Image: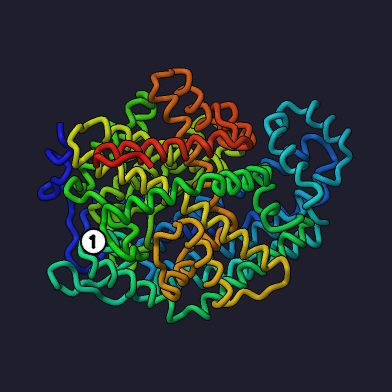
Amino acid sequence: MPLSAGASRLAGEDFVQGNAASERSAIPQRYKWDPARIFPDWQAWEREFAAVAADLPRLAGRRGSLDRSAAALRDAVEDLLDLRRRLEVVVLYASLRSDEDTRISENTAHRGRAGTLAVRFAEAASWFEPELLAMEPGRLAEFLRADPGLQLYTHFIDNIRRLRVHTLDPEREALLAAAANMAKGAGQVFNALNNADIKLGTIRDEQGREIELTKARFHKYIKSLDRRVRRETFERCLDSYGALINTLAANMDANVKNDVFYAGARRYAGTLEAALHPDAVPTEVFHNLLAGMDASLEVAHRYTRLRKRVLGLEPLRDHDLHVPLFPHGGFKYGYDAARDLILEALKPLGPEYLDIVREGFGARWIDVHESAGKRSGAYSSGAFGTSPYILMNWSEQLRDAFTLAHEMGHSVHTYLAGRHQPYVYADYPIFTAEVASTCNEQLLMHHLLGRTRDRGERLYLLDYRLTQINDTFVRQTMFAEFEYRMHRMGEQGETLTAETLNALYLEMLQKYWGPDVQFDPDRSAWNWSRIPHFYYGYYVYQYATAYAAAVAISRNILAGATAARDLYLDLLRSGSSRYPVEALQRAGVDMTRPDPIQDVFRLFSELLDEVEGLLGEEKE
């Protein structure tokens, strides 16, 4: 059945936004998440907040007890973990309520108080790791053997001991913990500016109507078939950040200096090592990604040349890089239609997985629509003992369906780990988290391509998949290299300025997109200033490594291998009970080797071959 037969249905099945973002009160309840499942109101939250705060002195009072007996060690571990678990629930509720409307100062204040409580917890617990590391190894091993209750925490303790050389004495650990609020300053400044203060102005849409530009609408109008609309969208958005470019550069310089300070304080060779070592990810994984990208970038440049030929543009500009190449095959989804589509696409993962997804759709895990003051973007969040929560800003684009599948992957991962692991191992690192989300995207694309033989729709989907590879694999690696190189500048004592950051980002754009794009030396170079992930400390490379792992895993599952599906679900259930590179190896993917990177470029090339075949072009 051609996709267009049902894909564009919107009326009567969904809430549809007007030209301005709606107030939250106007959105039907079933499209809003339900934080009341955590706390019924702020009063209940305040009671738990006070209870956690009251218990912190007890945890601090256990200082000096670990070496006394196995029972004393077990009691300290369990008290530490229980308080951390309760704190995470307090922080989650405050974060969800704040993100609903960042304009409400009361919610922002509650979120700030939750962050301060987290710092107080870190101070109260700061003695634990240094004291554990100071224990004589033979005595610790004796405790683990003698107390069956401690054996559960063997991996937890081993993971701490692995960080021995990077853990300071109790006094200095307490000092670093107390400085945590200051360390978050640059990220908080950017978050406030990016989500509450910055205004992107207005554009004229394809019909000449004046439209308020938001970050969600940027992603819609930058794909407009009207080049004037996408040029205005690009210019208005980037001019808003460019007007603040020196301030944003100073803020980024502070962010990088913070990372450099903490890496040095903990005796790491550099910021990359400091970011990767806590998750036991060897730096060779990061450098293997960059080297693999350098070796195969010509394939990405081939896609750029294809865009230039199909669009017939001379020159091809920055604002032309996201418009669909084959819009006659395009379609869009309302939320309800996307929900049904995702349930069909995820069937290869089996009935257990599908039942969890159905629960998520039915139990108000998801906050669907953009509203005034709502945090931009999308994420999945949750805490042990709560349901997962998904933030969306629905704009009726096909990308929203992929984003929803992506975040649902995170949420099912959270659900499975939380029900198959005790709290101590129920969390999981980003390195494996992004595999769970990206695998869902791969399955959704396979399902969509399998539903149509229509040439126009197939070209549209193939281009969408090529764009996914470019955005999730190539572009995120570009971000990773930019982040690495600006941190190297910081490590060498350089001050990051608007001039140096702009020049570096423009160099990255030209390297990764190739010579067939003409970049605006100002606006294109300012793009770094609007990327929140640069405040997350080497986060983005994991999108690319996860994409490579997800391509391999999804292909094995789609080949009908029940064993591959079972290994994948075991990965999701394992939480943090294994180190992430090892966990992926058990699922059949070794990210220390070049093979997964090469496989993505082979897929990229195969997709280009198919597009060129459908267009009747000769293979390059």
The image position of residue 297, as x and y in percent, is: 50, 49
Query: Which colour style is shown?
Result: rainbow
194 above or below 290? Answer: below
Using residue 526 as the reference point, say whether residue 180 is left or right of it.
right
Looking at the image, can residue 580 be seen? Answer: no
Q: Residue at x 12, y 68 (%)?
A: 207
Residue in the picture at 55% in, 63% down: 535
Query: Where in the figure is residue 585, as x and y percent of width and height?
Result: 59, 29
The residue located at (56%, 71%) in the rendering is 501
Q: Secondary structure at mark 1?
A: loop
Horizontal arrangement in the rendering, residue 19 relative to residue 35 (left or right): left
Report the quarter where the N terminus lies. top left
Q: Which quadrant would residue 170 be assigned to in this image? A: bottom right
Total numbered labels: 1
Q: Nearer the viewer, residue 511 or 157?
A: 511
Q: Is residue 295 left or right of residue 172?
A: left
Q: Nearer the viewer, residue 127 or 412?
A: 412
Q: Nearer the viewer, residue 302 or 134?
A: 302
Tell me where residue 49 appears, x and y as whole percent. 53, 58
Residue 343 position in % (x across, y down): 28, 33
10 Å neighbourhood of mark 1: few (<14), some, or many (≥20)? many
Q: Residue at x 59, y 58 (%)?
A: 537
Q: Quadrant of residue 579?
A: top right
Question: Is residue 387 depicted above or below 453 in this figure?
Answer: below
Nearer to us in this view, 373 or 563: 563
User: Badge 1 is on which residue?
Assistant: 224
- Circle 1: residue type: Ser
Quadrant into which the C terminus falls = top left
